[in-house]
Amino acid sequence: MIDTDAVISECEEHMRKAVDHLDHELTKIRAGAANPGMLETVHVDYYGQMVPLGQVAAVNTGDARTLFVKPWEKSMIDPIEKAIIGANLGFNPSNNGESVIIHVPMLTEDRRKALSKNAHAEGEHARVGIRSSRQKAMEAIKTAKKDGLPEDTAKSLDAEVEKLTGIYNKKVDALVDAKEKDIMKV
């Protein structure tokens, strides 16, 4: 006999992870305002090793349109600039001898639509994860039913899994809608 509480809690944990992952991925999609998360994917050549930008410099926002990258070592300014240009993020960095300055350009309407599509695609990935968790839980319940789990208990577990699926799908919708509003705001 399976532990029905474990099935439900595992299902919910996987759904929560899917939503958390979505939230993290949406922070990488820029909405016009400068955000240090925009540079998360940048890797810098640090004495022959490719390391994340955050390991060789501090990234801060100056205002809504400016990012400042302050390297721990001044000799890293040029490699950081090259890495940012090479990351194809659409930024044109400059430096003042002590830090790299990135002016975040305004988004065009076409770029806003493309970013909105990306947000919806990330939302769909999260929904796939939620459906996968739902399916695993339903299979476990079906197996338990064959092994002697009472019919009414199985039905209540099915209902609980469906309820969790609905709750987490609404969270995905809310995150994607909020990001889309943020992207489309001029």
Image (cartoon, rainbow, N blue to C red):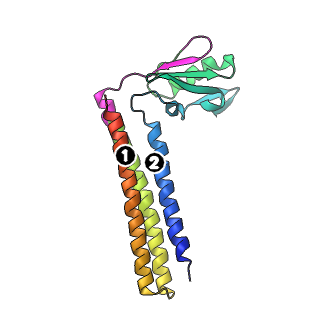
Residue where numbered disc 1 is placed: 176
Residue at the spot 62% in from the left edge and 18% down from the top edge: 77
Across and down, in percent, residue 45 comes to 64, 27
Q: Is residue 1 left or right of residue 160?
A: right
Does the segment drawn in magenta span residue 98?
yes
Residue at the spot 36% in from the left edge and 42% down from the top edge: 178
Residue at the spot 45% in from the left edge and 82% down from the top edge: 153
Across and down, in percent, residue 157 comes to 44, 76
Residue at the spot 62% in from the left edge and 14% down from the top edge: 98
Amino acid on which the number 2 mark rests in the picture: Leu
Q: Which mark is residue 91?
A: none
Residue 171 seen in the figure: yes
Q: Secondary structure at mark 2?
A: helix
Position of the N terminus, as image quadrant, is bottom right
Q: Are marks 2 and 1 in contact (CB under 8 Å)?
A: yes
Magenta segment boundaries in residue numbering: 95-113
